[in-house]
Amino acid sequence: MIPLTFAPATELARAVREREVSSAAVIEAHLARIAAINPQINAVVQLPAEEARAAARTADAALARGEQPGPLHGVPFTVKDTLDVAGVIGAMGVAERAGFIPDRDATVVARLRAAGGIVLGKTNVPPWGGGIETDNPVYGRTSNPYNLSRTPGGSSGGEAALIAAGGSPLGLGSDSGGSLRLPAHNCGIVTIKPTAGRVPTTTGGQTGDMHDPRTQVGLLARRVEDLCLALPLIAGPDGFDAGVAPVPLLDAAGVDLAVLRVACFTNDGVSEAAAAVAAAVRAAAQSLRACVAALEEQRPEGIERAWPITQGYWESVIDGRMPTADFYRLLRRWGRFRSTMLQFMQRWDAIVCPVAAVPAVPHGTSKNWTANDFRQASMISYTVPYSLTGWPCVVVRAGASPEGLPIGVQIVARPWREEVALALARQVEAALGGWQPPPL
């Protein structure tokens, strides 16, 4: 039997619902796993264990009374430390928030609780949730469970490391330039960055994680089926985030792969993928070739422009000294880029490409990087284009480096077509095996 701590959230929900296992047993198994692995990876920064145990007892009692269970009844989930959980410290890795205790849940946290989920803990981030390595002066550094000398990435690095290591079956994170996708790639798990406007970013009574228009709240898990289960639970307007549109979310199970046209590439014109990364992308593409209507090596024209636009955006928000005229020129460039990319997608239903040019890098590699540093481009030049467009992206493991580090691929769909990306990712996962247990 699969250990409880490595079972998908979907399977845990079914087993609890059918009373094959108690929610209390599921929570205890995950608390024990966290106790075993967290000293090595330092992913969990707040662990409200007694509150989780109490919620599990309540969930089990409700089933005993015959109450109708929710889709996640009695299943634990964890939360990136930039998203508020009522009554739990939300430091965001900075000293000035080290004692901050919010009095309300972020919308997505409240929605998973309403579906029966149980908050198990909060996970580590870079300071203020911004960065591609997870390390901060409050909680310290998080390590990659596949190689403790490597970073899990950022900024949802604690969440990805914990899920990969079996400490949580499901997590909430956010992504402005790759903060869900890079950690999922580095840690060999799955994630979805939804279409911009699909999921509310409301947290702490305000809209926007770091108030960045590129930011989307998404999910991390070990299996694609868990993304399919949880995405409908967090999507849709909340009456606060005015950017969320009431667009129907379609079911990945209804996607006919045989009619899809898929483009793929391994060089974005900014940072050519390492050999192992390119091989993983080719393996993912090959796994789809017999299932889809067309699969061709095609790169969106002008995709390399996303990197300088992103650099310009960082300049405008980090130092705040960009002249107004320059900022409006940047917005026009951004708008033209979005239009060019959308024209490309008139011919294709999805894109398969790298998440990053390289696998997980050693700790501290990016400490002295600047926004203009090519090495930083090698980590996120493949993710920032779809942050600028706001399109949905799913990451799934498709291979490993010679050192045994996981390698994910990015599957991008047209706006509002999450079900297409999920269906293709599920096919890649089935063909290539998806997540594999780390050596911890």
Image (cartoon, helix red, strand yellow):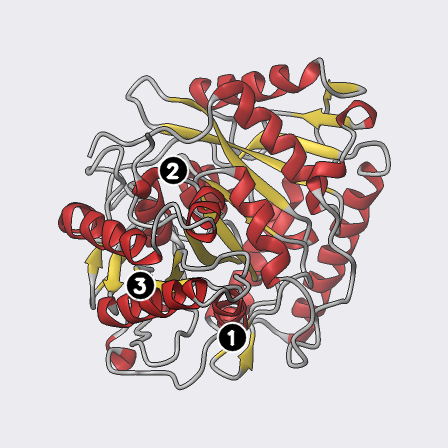
Residue density around tag 1, few if under 14, some if 14–19, many if 20 or more, within 10 Å:
few
Classify mark 3: helix, strand or loop. strand
- Please indicate, yes or no, whether residue 382 appears anywhere in the rendered image: no
Question: How far is the residue under mark 1 from the one under mark 3?
Answer: 35 Å
Q: Nearer the viewer, residue 58 or 286?
A: 58
In this rendering, the label closer to the viewer, 1 or 3:
3
Residue density around tag 3, few if under 14, some if 14–19, many if 20 or more, within 10 Å:
many
Say what amino acid the circle numbered 1 marks: Gly
Q: Position of residue 125 (x, y in %)?
A: 33, 60
User: Relative to residue 71, is residue 421 drawn left or right?
Assistant: right
In this rendering, the label closer to the viewer, 3 or 2:
3
Report which residue position mark 2 lands on: 186
Residue 320 disc label: 1
Question: How far is the residue under mark 2 from the one under mark 1?
Answer: 32 Å
Say what amino acid the circle numbered 3 marks: Gly
Residue 26 disc label: none
Residue at 63% over, 53% down? 194
Residue at 50% over, 72% down? 110
Q: Quadrant of the N terminus?
A: top left
Say what amino acid the circle numbered 2 marks: Asn
Report which residue position mark 3 lands on: 121
